[in-house]
Amino acid sequence: MDFVITKENLLRELQAMQGIVEKKSTIPILSNILINATKGQLELLATDLEVGRRSPSRDR
């Protein structure tokens, strides 16, 4: 699936999640951000098992 997003919008969401994603986690999956793309929506999710953040889903 392809999606289109402006660099500024993607960067803003990634910067907001940067503090949540652990760089030195013992569980590798916690070092990543899940990008979920569905028809008309893009959602980013990050967690460190204590704090989580989900980007707002928006119709594009």
Image: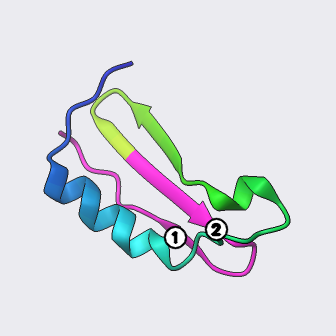
Between residue 36 and residue 12, name the one nearer to us: 12
Looking at the image, residue 5 sits to the left or right of residue 38; the answer is left
Task: Write down the residue under mark 1.
Answer: 53
Q: Is residue 6 left or right of residue 36?
A: left
Residue at image coords 47%, 72%: 18
Q: Residue furthest front?
A: 24
Task: Identify residue type, mark 2.
Answer: Thr
Residue 15 pos. (x, y %):
35, 71
Real-space Cα distance between discs 1 and 2?
6 Å
Judge whether residue 24 is colored magenta. no
- Placement of the C terminus among the 4 image quadrants: top left
Quadrant containing the N terminus in the rendered view: top left
Judge from the rendering whether residue 7 lies leftward or rightward of residue 16; answer left or right: left
Q: Secondary structure at mark 2?
A: strand
Range of magenta residues: 43-60
Q: Is residue 19 above or below residue 5?
A: below
Query: Horizontal and vertical percent for residue 13?
Result: 33, 64
N-term-proximal mark, 1 vs 2:
2
Residue that label 2 marks = 47
Q: Residue 35: where, in percent of width, then height?
A: 48, 43
Q: Which mark is residue 29?
A: none
Mark 1 lies on a secondary structure that is: strand
Asked if marks 1 and 2 touch (Cβ < 8 Å), the reply is: yes
How many numbered marks have been drawn onto this rendered protein structure?
Answer: 2
Q: Residue furthest right?
A: 26
